[in-house]
Amino acid sequence: MGDPIFILLVEDNPADIKLTRLAFEKLKIQNEIFAVQDGVEAIKYLRKQGEYGNAARPDLILLDLNLPKKNGREVLKEIKEDPELRTIPVLILTSSSEERDIHETYHNHANSFITKPVDLGSFNSVVNSIETFWFTIVKLPKVN
């Protein structure tokens, strides 16, 4: 098995954080998930500010759109406009299925848009698809 995958989960719902962690654990892939619960904390983490001074650079970001303080659209835009961060793949994982949200996030260079399923079995299937595509098929950039 390859190097562990480091995921930054940006999600304000504690139940969804727990569900995401359980789904990835069930897959038995080597991964570490660090969660922040609002957009301001996400940017501070990515820029290694304050308490995140020694934060690891994520291999992948799972980003909710509806966040407090700074929404996911704003976070995505900041990431993709930053030369140091723009190569990190950002997967939008949200309850929205609005065409406007899909269009806007792809316009701002999201790497994928996934609507969160409401039932556990479907959610596990989505996580399995993420694992298969992003951790098995795709080669992610490694930055020192």
Image: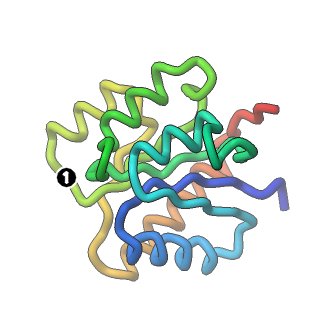
Residue positioned 70% across, 63% down in the render? 31
Query: How far from the left and from the top, in percent, is residue 4?
Result: 78, 58
Tell me what residue is drawn at x 51 percent, y 61 percent: 129
Quadrant location of residue 83? top right
Q: Is residue 128 above or below residue 80?
A: below
Figure coloring: rainbow
Please provide percent x and percent y for residue 80. 47, 25
Residue 28, quarter of the rendered image: bottom right
Name the secondary structure under disc 1: loop
User: Residue furthest toward the front?
Assistant: 50
Q: Nearer the viewer, residue 73 or 122?
A: 73
Say left or right for 76 vs 100: right
**Front position in the image: 93 or 84:** 84
> Residue at left 53%, top 67%?
128
- In x, y percent, where is residue 94? 31, 56
Circle 1 residue? 97
Q: Assess disc 1: are there few (<14), some (14-19) or many (≥20) residues with their C-alpha within 10 Å of its C-alpha.
A: few
User: From what the image shows, is residue 1 above or below residue 112?
Assistant: below
**Quadrant of residue 47 in the image?**
top right
Left/right placement of residue 111 relative to residue 51 reads left
The quadrant of the rendering that contains the N terminus is: bottom right
Type of the residue with mark 1: Ser
